[in-house]
Amino acid sequence: MDDYTSHDALGLAGLVRSGQVSAGELVEAAIARIEQLDPAINAVVTRDFEGARALAKAPLPAGPFTGVPFLVKDFGIGVAGWRCTSGSRFCADVVDTADTGLTTRFREAGVVLLGRGASSEYGIVGNVETSQFGPTRNPWNPRHIAGGSSGGSAAAVAAGIVPMAHASDGLGSIRIPAACCGLVGMKPTRNRVPNLPDGFDYAMGFCVDHVVTRSVRDSAAMLDAIGLPEPGSPYAVPAKAGAYLDEVARGPGKLRIRWSAETPSGAPIDPEVQAALAHTAAALAALGHDVREDTLGADHRAIARARAPVSAANFAAGMRRVIERVGREPREDELEPMTWAALQGSRAVTGEQAFYGYQELRVLTRQVVEKFDHFDVYLCPVMSTPPPEIGFSDPASVTPRDLGKKQMALFPFCALFNFTGQPSLSLPLGMSASGLPIGLMFTGRYADEATLYRLAGQLETELPWAQRRPQVWA
């Protein structure tokens, strides 16, 4: 179908419901675009075209996205019969025997699974350049990164291969690739989307799942579909007042918005990112919001000290599960240098260190959450610069120490809100002079995705991005 890329996911599903197109035609359109475009961006690392064709011919669930082609990330959720490499040579032959809970929810929403989008190795790096598959490239300029760890999903959506795709976020891995690729990327509230009944409480709720999309309404409608209670969850799903899709069209009213470019290190951000932030703040004020420059006052050094043993212990536990699946320990040449160093170091963390760090995080992040008693939304950049070139943060060629420093400098803003558990949303509101997207991040009160979706709906209308097209486009 010639106008496939002119519709978002809800639009395509509407065409299927009305009988104007079939699910099979949508699948063929997506397959054609994978074959045409993926050689330029290297986004899709597992393909199940025949399985997708068979699904499209069978009766599909009557969900909000019935018949819409969809990718899942190559990390974190299982799809029966598909390999899940987690971006690693060590897991090259790992095959899932069953769908995990979130995969079931995606299927119930009506999507047709086509394949997997590339991930960085075990989601560690905020960029996808793996020894297993090579670099995933940015459709806006293939010399530049697509972000990570959900970079394959983001690149495929930005190029028009699929209208939305699964992504997950432990330290920014939804918001970073959304910012790099000019997409909408909502990190939901902690525990909003449980991956159960067969999943587990990975990262104590710091890591969350959702999607990257081109439209705000697709993001909202998918969160309505998958953000549901699960009886086996160790935590209650945070309550919401109503459907997020309804919120997108509802005016946000006059919001109290605070904004800042302050980085944890105090280092300045790129002038183009600073200009995009200031322009967005001015636009928000012109729309009638109460907009003031102010910082959160977070103790970033203390938070970094507290999170280090927590993240390390979580990684060690996650790798233990991987090793149990593979049936042996990895060799050093099967892991990227950053991953190998992280595994060796993480195994030295004691239970006392991990739990003390977790307790400290709870205290420190509570202080941040309480700041939101005095305003509604906090605005900052997603990244300190526009997307850098391929190779800047290549985990195979940059030493682990230098890679860690580059990551901290490039992505200083995102991780805090994984630890506070608050919803945090990247919107494609800026462009660099060289034509690369710049994402701005809006963070709301705990469990208040509704306010963010209302504001995002307003900005999508007032500062539209839908007509922008990258170099690699279907």
Image (spheres, rainbow, N blue to C red):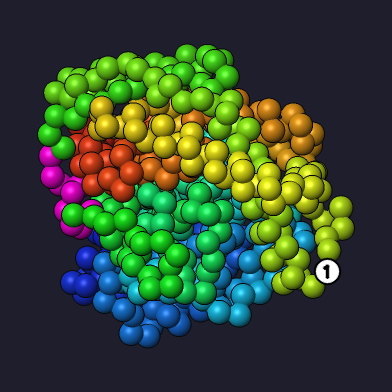
Please name whichever residue, 253 or 316, is drawn nearer the observer in this view of the structure: 316
Where residue 472 sits in the image (x, y, percent)? 49, 43
Determine if the magenta segment contains residue 163: no
Where residue 95 sits in the image (x, y, percent)? 66, 74
| Residue 421 in which image quadrant | top left
Please name whichever residue, 307 or 121, is drawn nearer the observer in this view of the structure: 307
Instruction: Indicate whether 282 appears above or below 458.
Output: above
Q: Amino acid at mark 1?
A: Arg
Asked whether, in this view, residue 22 is left or right of residue 33, the answer is left
Instruction: Indicate whether 32 appears above or below 59.
Output: above
Where residue 390 sits in the image (x, y, percent)? 65, 35
Instruction: Indicate whether 122 appears above or below 420.
Output: below
| x 49%, y 54%: residue | 205
Where does the magenta region start and end?
242-251
Badge 1 is on which residue? 328
| Residue 453 in which image quadrant | top left
